[in-house]
Image (tube, grey):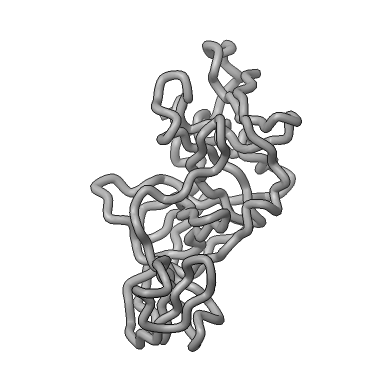
Amino acid sequence: MMRLGASLAALLLVLGFAPARAAVLCKARTGALLARDACKRSETSVDLAQFGPAGAPGTRGAAGSGAVLNDTNNAFVGSLLDDPLLVPTVATRVLRTVEDDVVSFTVDAATGFLDASSPFVVYYEHPGCTGRLFLAPLISANQPMFPQALIHDGIAFYPVDALELHPTVSLLTFTTMGLCSGTFTAPDQCCVPTPGTPLAAEGKALALGSFGLVPPFHTDAP
């Protein structure tokens, strides 16, 4: 148990949550762990003390422990979840903080951030795909510990809250003009009026170009 407590404490430090920020670990209804300044009403605070004291620092781990991915200019891309030398590059995931949220991104070291491997849709609370956006849960036997960004054409959509029933009125899909039954925006965005109450998590959208990262990426180990 002491080892688990130390691991969780180390994880918060790797992600940039120093004790001075008073960040807490919150568990959403989906089981995802989120590092925040304060838990939301739908989340449960995870007390690191329940895992026992962190104890004194241990011996230095093997090479690759705590490794990060940097871009060609040595700018930080993210903390590695997968070793790109052991896992196919299409499955390499990194963690990085976006505002107050810790998000997992899938990357290819040679080309940068990867589009989602499966089609996905984005729900919106207002007509014309405006207002708050919501994301349906990924169909997976093993839900990720951290929110997973769904990327399409340089835009990352990621959940920031627990799953709930949300009233929505429009739906964004990605298709061709000929297959769009709503309002089409080039190159491939299709907004369709679709009133409903899906089980989804509130999300955010981010232009990955705002990171200013330049591939190829490379691994740096402590």
x then y, percent, for residue 147: 46, 52
Question: Total number of numbered labels?
Answer: 0
Tell which residue pokes out farthest to the left in this image: 141
Task: Residue at 41% x, 77% y: name it.
Answer: 171
Q: Nearer the viewer, residue 19 or 76?
A: 76
Q: Nearer the viewer, residue 119 or 12?
A: 119
Q: Is residue 207 left or right of residue 2?
A: right
Q: Quadrant of residue 194?
A: bottom left
x then y, percent, for residue 27: 43, 54
Q: Nearer the viewer, residue 65 or 22?
A: 65
Quadrant of the rendering where the C terminus is positioned: top right
Q: Is residue 45 above or below residue 70?
A: below
x then y, percent, for residue 210: 70, 53
Q: Is residue 75 left or right of residue 59?
A: right
Q: Is residue 82 left or right of residue 38?
A: left
Q: Is residue 168 visible?
A: no
x then y, percent, for residue 183: 46, 82
Task: Residue at 51% x, 34% y: name it.
Answer: 108
Q: Is residue 213 visible?
A: yes
Q: Is residue 170 above or below residue 140?
A: below
Task: Residue at 39% x, 86% y: name it.
Answer: 193
Quadrant of the rendering where the N terminus is positioned: top left
Tell which residue pokes out farthest to the front in this image: 178
Task: Residue at 41% x, 35% y: name it.
Answer: 91
Q: Nearer the viewer, residue 213 or 160?
A: 213
